[in-house]
Image (cartoon, helix red, strand yellow):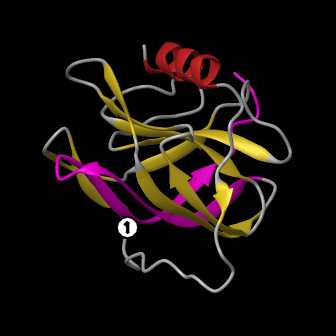
Amino acid sequence: MTRKIAILTAAALGLMGCEPRDEGVKAEIPDEPLSGTIDGAPWSYHLGLSDPFLASDDEWFVHVSDQDIDCDRIDGGSALLFRLPAHEGEWEITDRDEFVFYVQATGQSHQALEGVIRVDRVTNDHIDGALMARIDDAFDVAGTFTVLRCTGI
């Protein structure tokens, strides 16, 4: 189900990317695992995976979940769905970007209004980074993450 939502979200929002941040501005993202609230409930990062059908060499479409997921079944739990640049840097998330809070219990997606994505390290099989994203107090996450690259299903 989440895979269908991710694909529909990607199609609906198009290939929008994050905007580069001002080089002099550094976001203060906590140096601890990604956590916060989704739909007012506590949420903590467990695993992040890329979707091989929506990834390119320059950008990965990722699913960051609070559940144990794998490349054969990228669904389960409330999650963050977003495009992640596949090169080091820092980007601002705006209401024009494709960054969604997905709520498992309701099946609803909520578009982030503000935030920052930072990519610290890129290899052939994973990306290390950090982010903070927010709509309001009910949808607010920040911290570090690793996304593994799925190569096919």
| Residue at x 58% of width, y 40% of height | 62
Horizontal side of 37 relative to 54 (left or right) equals: left
Q: Position of residue 86 (x, y in %)?
A: 76, 55
**Residue 82, picture quadrant:** top right
Tag 1: amino acid? Pro
Q: Main secondary structure of the magenta part?
A: strand
Q: Position of residue 153 (x, y in %)?
A: 69, 21
Vertical side of 90 occupied by 60: above or below: above
Q: Position of residue 146 (x, y in %)?
A: 55, 59
Q: Position of residue 17 (x, y in %)?
A: 68, 44
Horizontal side of 134 relative to 90 (left or right) equals: left
In the image, the segment drawn in magenta is 125-153
**Residue 2, picture quadrant:** top left
Which one is in front, 117 or 97? 97
- The reply to whether the magenta stretch includes residue 139 is yes
| Residue at x 56% of width, y 37% of height | 98
Horizontal side of 93 relative to 86 (left or right) equals: left
Vertical side of 23 occupied by 15: above or below: above
Vertical side of 82 occupied by 120: above or below: below
Vertical side of 8 occupied by 6: above or below: below
Which one is in front, 105 or 137? 137
> How packed is label 1: few (under 14 Cα within 10 Å), some, or many (20 or more)?
some
**Residue 22, picture quadrant:** bottom right
- The reply to whether the magenta stretch includes residue 137 is yes
Give the labeled residue for mark 1: 33
